[in-house]
Amino acid sequence: MRGAVGGRVSVLGVRHHGPGSARAVRAELERLAPDIVLIEGPPEADALVALAGSGDMEPPVALLAHVPGEPARSAFWPFATFSPEWQAIQYALRAGVPVRFCDLPAAVTLAGQHHDADAEPEGGDAGMGADTGMGADAGKGGDAGEGVNAGEGGNAGGGGDAREREDGLRVDPLAVLAEAAGYDDPERWWEDVIEHRGAETETETETGTGTGTGAGAGAGTGTDMRARAGAGTGADIRAREGTGAPAEVRVGAGGGASAEVRVGAGGGASAEVRVGAGGGASAEVRVGAGGGASAEVRVGTGTGAPAGMRSGADMDARTVTGAAVGIGAGVGGGGVFEAVAEAIAAVREGYTPGLGEARREAYMRRVLRRALKDGFQRVAVVCGAWHVPALTGLPAVGADDRLLRGLPKVKVEMTWVPWTYGRLASWSGYGAGVTSPGWYHHLFAAPDRPVERWLADAAGVLREEGLAVSPAHVIESVRLARSLAALRGRPLAGLAEVTEAARAVLCEGDDLPVELIQRRMVVGERLGRVPEDTPMVPLQRHLREEQRRLKLKPEALERDLDLDLRKPLDLGRSHLLHRLRLLGVRWGTPREAQGKGTFRESWRLAWSPEFDVALIEAGAWGTTVPAAATAQVLALARDAGAIAELTGLVERCLLADLPMALPGVLRALSDRAALDPDVTHLMAALPAMARARRYGDVRGTPAAGLDAIVSSMLARVCAGLSPAMTGLDDDAARELLGHVDGVHAATSLLDAGSRAEWLAALRGVAGRRDLHGLVAGRLTRILLDAGELASEEAASRMSLATSAGHPPARVAAWVEGFLSGDGLLLVHDPRLLGLVDGWLAGLAPEAFVDVLPLLRRTFGTFEAPERRAIGRRVRAQGGRRAEEPEAEIDETRAAPAVRTVLTILGRAR
């Protein structure tokens, strides 16, 4: 195409994150040798392109744009090794030619996040691969914008935007085209058409009646791959390339009617595409491109056309997009990219883009005009295939200027950040994601024999987990994958075949190892890396230094980390992880430590790309992790609404070793505790304070000032305990007991004087007759376990509580409170067990039915061995009660019987 200002413009339409498209773009740029490359993406990133050539830059990475002071308003543009745009950048850097991004500026995109519909209406297109707002939706039912995360209806596959049908339903273009080709899985169709390179050796198979498949290659005549399926119907896929020879692809499906696609490209030869589908009716599309040959496009659908496709030129646009890109990647050559442009131009004829899409394409044309005006003669544009027609013909400048005039803008900053394959996967919510990034990376990077290499790597993964997998397993799995591909008429074993082969042979039918392969290989564990000279906020840079100092490398895969706080290195790691959690960077999640001892701590680590946004946001608090965490804690203390929040902050300060923040939090806590009249608030806060008090001993962290606050809080709790237990209903009593148990456990961490003060307060309250049954029973049990109440006195209190004068419901509540926690007391104290058993045995049938749910709840909390032991004790006591007392023997009356028995036995005297 000749530019309006002069110069040759080549527009390469691609599928984002497609290895086939990436290979095709790389080869085409080598052939074209452009003197400038334009890439779909935010122009603010032009200054960052050079960093992509650093040896320390390792994909996957992403461009991150954010609004200073409002990092939550952010957007990502991810790149993998197999992304066509990344390969275009790498080519330009190697060739020494400039690179410019040509999409709508991020300043406009991020302004649209908080702007009205005039800036970005519902369905607005937010850019190539842009993952806005850390996965936030960009609008209901929106145009996926070559992969923008658009919320409802966003297309997760590459190849173009999802489109809405006349009936309002969303259409997945890959699914539509795959269905037309006889596939029930769009990704599987995409692999066959694009991702697999041509077969290097000739193979022939025959499957089914009247069905055949074949693949061959020959020098001078090109390559030919065919696939037929269906009883009495033909489906034919062919691909040929060679000088002066046509290249074609045919696809057929339908009962009694054929459907086909042909594509050809060659010197002096015509090229065409045909698509047909329908019951008894054919439909076709033709595209021709070649030296001196005409090109034409025809679209038609029959009565059996698949859902989402319309008659005439209004056929689903993304369907033709996917087909064209697939053919371009599979066959290669500049003529194919031209065929793509012609096919999309025909489909877009009469199509009016939405406002957001129109503005994006207007800006792309503005950047293209600027490049031509700057004197570049050979311009290459790499963009989503759907935008190709909008860039191959440049309308009047004024029309584009009117579209772009007055757009809202915000100040943005941009940088590179590491990305992960897990975040690139479509299930993570990223609109332009792919279902199997690890598999696509393998297809792009494997120099040869991709199936053999994949299954060998899978065997290595399984062996790392201790599973016995031998070379013979690998050989047999490769054979099975090839056989499955041949039976299904596929040119090469795809992900479905290698997965089934791994399940059947390597995993011996067990799905659990298959899930391991899925997580580690199909999706992948890869976490990218950016150079040290990448623009970062000081807080990000300090965290990198801390990670190196503490030998704590960020990884995408979840892993467990066990720390021994007696070791300086592990203690430093604990401090860092706790500080980051205060800043909203939840790199580590605490889990229950293995083993005993307060010096142990266990974490589960997993790094996520969104943490960089959190670090940028937290950068406003300070330039180092400790300084930022300290400022954040003091701000939280000022805004805390409850005492429990402040005590939690005290605990977190000590865990994170923030001595500069602790005095301020303690002052706020002391002031709030002195004014809070609700004793339950103090009771809820005291356990955290007691735990915090211990950290001065366990972690070596000074906890000065805590003793006075803890003593004051405990004194107020003891003084207010009796009033707090007056007039409680069932729910209030149960809630209060939770606080009582918490404080009781906390006092065991304090000194002996504090413990004695608490137990004295409980003794003073436990003797009251107006207590709720649940509270009275629980206090009796606490005092008994603490040695403050003799067993005889406890039995006396139980006997009184279970006497006939009390309602059954109150007695059941008392028993529940007394027995809560464990049932070993009934196992080891027969007297208490007898009291409970006697009370139950004496209940009337109606009363027993009423209290049964309460008792079931009580005994249901006991461990199974405890319940069995109690049952054995009850049976034993019941057996003794059933025994009759021994009857007195009248020896005179028994004498005749005795003599008779002795005579029979031969012992008569």
Image: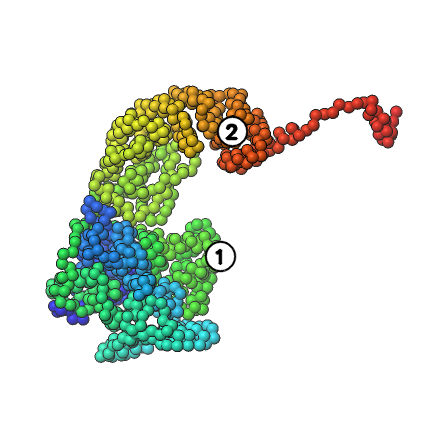
Indicate the position of residue 164 as horizontal and vertical percent values: 30, 63
The residue to which callout 2 is attached is: 807
- Amino acid tagged 1: Gly
Left or right placement of residue 113 versus residue 800 in this view: left
Q: Is residue 450 above or below residue 797?
A: below
Residue 246 showing in the rendered view: yes
Helix, strand or loop at mark 2:
loop
For label 2, count other residues whose C-alpha is less than 10 Å away and answer few (under 14), some (14-19) or many (20+): few
User: Which residue is rendered at x = 38% and y = 71% of the image?
Assistant: 201
- Amino acid tagged 2: Pro
Question: Between residues 563 and 651, which one lies in front from this camera angle?
Answer: 651
The quarter of the displayed image where residue 541 is located: top left
Indicate the position of residue 592 as horizontal and vertical percent values: 40, 38
Separation of residues labelled 2 and 1 (CA atoms): 61 Å
Indicate the position of residue 309 as horizontal and vertical percent values: 33, 69
Residue 236 showing in the rendered view: no
Question: Between residues 4 and 532, which one lies in front from this camera angle?
Answer: 4
Left or right placement of residue 591 versus residue 91 in this view: right
The residue to which callout 1 is attached is: 509
Quadrant of the frame with the N terminus = bottom left
Helix, strand or loop at mark 1:
loop
User: Which residue is rendered at x = 40% and y = 37% of the image?
Assistant: 593
Quadrant of the frame with the C terminus = top right
2 or 1: mark nearer the eye? 2
